[in-house]
Image (cartoon, helix red, strand yellow):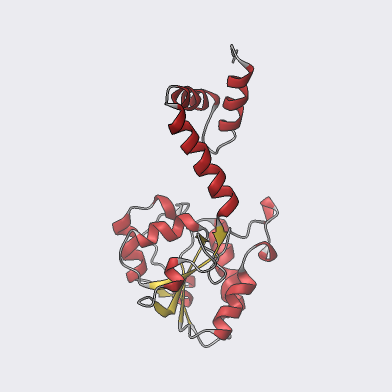
Amino acid sequence: MNFSSKLLENAVAEFAKLPGVGQKTALRLVLHLLNQDKPDVERFSAAMTKLRNEIQHCEVCHNISDSKVCEICAAHKRDRTLVCVVEDTRDVMAIENTNQYNGIYHVLGGLISPMDGIGPADLTIDSLVERVKADEIKEVIFALSATMEGDTTIFYLHKRLKDSAVTISTIARGIAFGGELEYVDEITLGRSITTRVPYEHSLSR
């Protein structure tokens, strides 16, 4: 792709680094910003800079947060005996949008994937085990994507938690194998949570 401006080329190259954004889409986004008023572009730039510099991760559940403890963990009306284990913040948002869950969360920060060099030590698994030992948690729900990596992670987590006193369950598989949790419609995801099953039962299927 030939550019009439090095500044334009550099901006397109940066946008093209975003997931799912090719050069043509990146060029369209950059040209769109160029057509905006300067104050609008400055607000956009300031918002991204502020996000990168000030964003935090909840010291309890590891969800993205504006403060040391996220709003969900700080909410007194949440059921603290119930913790839902998810891959990342997108899954927290997806489950919250169902309005079918009132517990708290634990964000792993990824899934075990030896092919990608991601092992248990790269995730917040030890933190989850400590929470189960220390908190008043009575049930742990695995709400991970129905993929090989998701199943591998669930199997490992079950091994780490099976000797604890908590109930271990997994969301019902109304979700097709290979499906990413964030793309499941809210009704299906909500039903999968409310009709969750003990993890041992899912192994016999």
Give the residue furthest to the front: 39
Identify whether 142 is placed above or below 23. below
Image location (x, y in percent) of residue 78: 38, 75
The answer to whether residue 205 is visible is: no
**Quarter of the figure with the C terminus:** bottom left
Image location (x, y in percent) of residue 40: 43, 33
Please name the residue shown 43% across and 53% down the image: 182
User: In the rendered view, does 190 fall on the left or right side of 119?
Assistant: left
Please name the residue shown 60% across and 34% down the image: 17
The answer to whether residue 23 is visible is: yes
Q: Nearer the viewer, residue 173 or 33?
A: 33
Please name the residue shown 63% across and 63% down the image: 123
Say how many tags the image has.
0
User: In the rendered view, does 33 fall on the left or right side of 192?
Assistant: right
Q: Nearer the viewer, residue 107 or 54?
A: 54
Image location (x, y in percent) of residue 151: 54, 63
